[in-house]
Amino acid sequence: MEGQKEVLADTPYGQVEVTTGSLDGQEVMFLSRHGRQHVLPPHAVNYRGNIWALRALGARKIIATAAVGSLSPSLLPGDLVLPDQFLDFTKKREGTFYQGGEGVLHVDMTEPYCPEIRNIILQSASELQLKVQAQGVYVCTEGPRFETPAEIRMFHQWGGDMVGMTGVPEVVLAREGGLCYASIALVTNMAAGIADHPLSHAEVAAMTKSLGKTLAALLGRTLKNLGMERNCSCARAAKEAGKF
Ligand code: HPA
């Protein structure tokens, strides 16, 4: 990023660190959901503060990344997938900006991930001749522990393709805030019981690191192709409740 600045954004949910700058003349922001030093475990991430901060600083489109374990033999470590649906198995996270007192919002989740951004990521991947799976069901667990093999078998039988710990409620809050949101999932491992060895954070971190350059290229090309115009309906959900 050019003109890089570290910004501390004040939100109703505490301060959030965001890096701002520009890429090819387009304003962009970068936010580490786990904090700069990766100190916040998935259940302690400030999901509401993060989305609030990005919105308040002017963001309208979010491209998230997510490390995932694969539930299916058709997704292998090193693969990239764009989730198009999710199953929510989180337990104790603040999952809404609407806690009562300021109206009630039952936000529509028919198409949780912005179709416009997803298409642009796919187009960008094809320009770079990168293989990206166009669809997949993301299962979000509470963590921070990995799953049991019995849980993984159940998630697969229930339609899940990949499992991670951070995608929800992030995607929901983005929609409540009227933001476009898509996620690029990086398959870092086969899930528990499918893998032939116990799982470790080190394994996930090593695969994430080895995909770093590919991901950066895909993000760079996607940002170039993205633009500020919005022809999707992601902003509509927020209008119904009137908070944003
Ligand atoms: N389970 C949950 N979250 C993950 C995994 C996993 O196997 N791999 C990367 N994030």
Image (spheres, grey):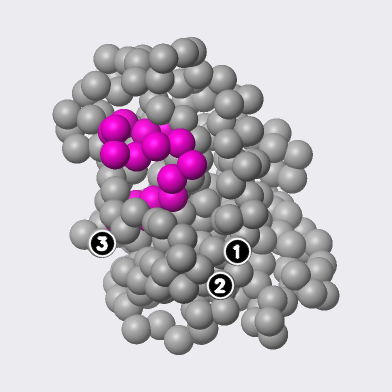
Q: Main secondary structure of the magenta part?
A: loop
Look at the picture and state if 62 lies above or below 127: above
Magenta segment includes 74: yes
Q: CA distance from mark 1 to mark 3?
A: 26 Å
Looking at the rendered structure, the secondary structure element under dot 1 is helix
- Residue 46, located in which quarter of the rendered image? top right
Q: Amino acid at mark 3?
A: Glu
Label 1 belongs to which residue?
217
Residue marked by disc 3: 111
Queried on whether the Cβ of the residue with tag 1 lies below 8 angstroms from ligand 1, the answer reads: no
SS state under label 3: loop
Segment colored magenta:
68-84
| Residue at screen point 69% across, 37% down | 38
In space, the residues marked 3 and 2 are separated at their CA atoms by 24 Å
In the rendered image, which residue does mark 2 sit on? 221
Mark found first going from the N terminus, 3 or 2: 3
Query: At numbered mark 2, what does the secondary structure look like: helix, strand or loop?
Result: helix
| Residue 215 falls within the magenta-colored stretch | no
Q: Is residue 144 left or right of residue 92?
A: right
Query: Residue 87: image x %, image y %?
Result: 28, 40
